[in-house]
Image (cartoon, rainbow, N blue to C red):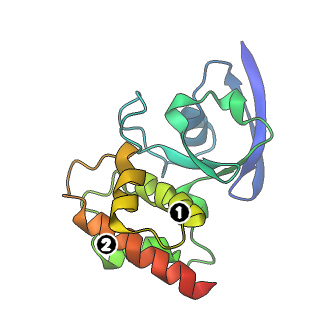
Amino acid sequence: MTTKVSFTLNGEAVSAEVDSRTLLVEMIRENLGKTGTHVGCDTSQCGACVIHLDGRSVKSCTMLAVQAEGADVATIEGVATNGKLHPMQEAFREHHGLQCGYCTPGMIMSSLDLVKQNPDPDEKQIREWLEGNLCRCTGYQNIVRAVKAGAQAMRADD
């Protein structure tokens, strides 16, 4: 059975006919063409699929698309503005908070939610917050540095 699902994606109204069992990550990638949201594990373990749903970070591989009906959804594609990287994206680039880059969109989306809730997180808080985001390439040290730097840059922009 198909269902029409409508929500706001990165500030734009979108809708698609999807099977009622379609995961939100599948709708975002396959129906709406936003492939920055990655599928890493299909079991909610890796965090590669993190998006923002009504301002909070969620793993889109554990939600049905129909659960996003009427919501405000943000993906990594909506983070930069006018071709300029968001301060958190810039911090990941500048501090080498990535290697292969597969986990990076989820890391950034999770980090943005952390900083929204805690504008000046310490290393322990960052590590605890990112426990649900796995990186198979790094030792996390540069990711933590990037989140600290991104948080500082975001405070400076306020």
147 to the left or right of 97: right
Q: Is residue 63 above or below residue 99?
A: above
Provide residue 75's location: percent of width, then percent of height: 58, 53
Provide residue 94's location: percent of width, then percent of height: 33, 79
Q: Is residue 75 above or below residue 63?
A: below
Q: Earlier in the sequence, mark 2 or mark 1?
A: 1
Nearest to the observer: residue 156 or residue 125: 125
In the image, what residue occupies the spot 31% across and 64% down? 143
123 to the left or right of 2: left
Q: Residues within 10 Å of mark 2 (few under 14, many from 20)?
A: some
In the image, what residue occupies the spot 45% across and 60% down? 108
- At numbered mark 2, what does the secondary structure look like: helix, strand or loop? helix
> Cβ–Cβ below 8 Å for labels 2 and 1?
no
From the image, which quarter does the N terminus lie in?
Answer: top right
**Amino acid identity at mark 1:** Leu
**Amino acid identity at mark 2:** Arg
Marks 2 and 1, how far apart at CA: 14 Å
Nearest to the observer: residue 158 or residue 107: 158
In the image, what residue occupies the spot 40% across and 60% down? 125
Q: Is residue 155 above or below residue 33?
A: below
Spot the residue most to the bottom.
156
Q: Which mark is residue 145?
A: 2
Provide residue 128's location: percent of width, then percent of height: 37, 52
Q: Is residue 92 visible?
A: no
Q: Residues within 10 Å of mark 1 (few under 14, many from 20)?
A: many
Provide residue 54's location: percent of width, then percent of height: 71, 49
Q: Which mark is residue 29?
A: none
Q: Which mark is residue 112?
A: 1
